[in-house]
Amino acid sequence: MLERITRREEADLFIAWMAIALSFAIINIAPYGILQPVMAINPVTALVYFGIALLTVGIGFILHEMAHKFVAIRFGYWAEFVKDNTMLLIAVVMAALVGFVFAAPGATVIYSQDGRGLTREQDGIISAAGPVVNLVLCLLFAALFFVVGGRAAYINHSLIAMIGLAGVQINAMIAAFNLLPISILDGRKVLAWNVVAFIVLIAAAFGTLVASYYLFL
């Protein structure tokens, strides 16, 4: 199925991945923005933060968008991720200035190949696919975190524990943000399709996000 990812789409995914990973790395280095006092950090540590963000954001963001794409293809449509340069710039600038990542790097655009439109059910299922993948990844990264020793390993600067916790937090953020029932986000379409599915998914996403900050640490 990888042959269905076009060269242009590969380039857009790569650029968006780099920008979002940089944004998450920045908020680890300067949690309150660069305008506030920033802790001293050496280049090696900065590279470690960036590497962790590359891995966790790369897996979470790309699989989220590919879930949308391949479920749409399964329904007989064509779909491609298209980056939004303005939103990518905003994500990096906001991370640097205020220590907050507003991750809306673009969208998977769905095209009809025979003139038919998406049904409400199809649109809801396609939209739910991305956050569902992120929630599954939260479970996998949480398992990694606890297998290597959990909180104790994290406090002792275990790289694997750091990756595990970052993977849970980032995937929970991606799922929670996209499930907000506003604008063109996934949540609005899931809610229009199935109220119960929406409640279960958004509760799981925000519950996991809160737990990743307050229970793991």
Image (cartoon, rainbow, N blue to C red):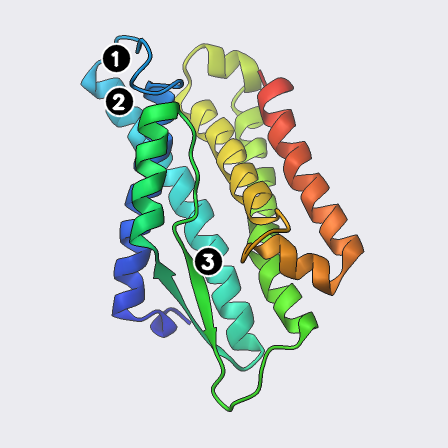
Residue at the outermost right position: 196
The earlier-in-sequence mark between 2 and 1 is: 1
Q: Which x, y percent locates residue 5?
A: 35, 69
Q: Is 59 placed above or below 28 here?
A: below
Residue marked by disc 2? 46
Residue 205 x %, y %: 64, 40
Rendered location of residue 33, percent (x, y):
35, 20
Q: Residue at x 43, y 59 (%)?
A: 107
Residue 202, quarter of the rendered image: top right
- Along the line of sight, which residue is nearer the eye, 35 or 149? 35
Of callouts 1 and 3, the N-terminal one? 1
Q: Please state which amino acid type lies under the numbered disc 2.
A: Ala
Q: Residue at x 68, y 72 (%)?
A: 120
**Quadrant of the image containing the C terminus:** top right
- Residue indicated by mark 3: 65
Where does residue 22 sit, x and y in percent of width and height? 30, 35
Whether residue 31 sits left or right of residue 14 in the image: it is right
Left or right for 201, reference 3 = right
Question: How far apart are labels 3 and 2 at the CA level?
Answer: 27 Å
Figure disc tally: 3
Tell me the tag on residue 41: 1
SS of the residue under disc 1: loop
Answer whether labels 2 and 1 touch (C-beta < 8 Å): yes
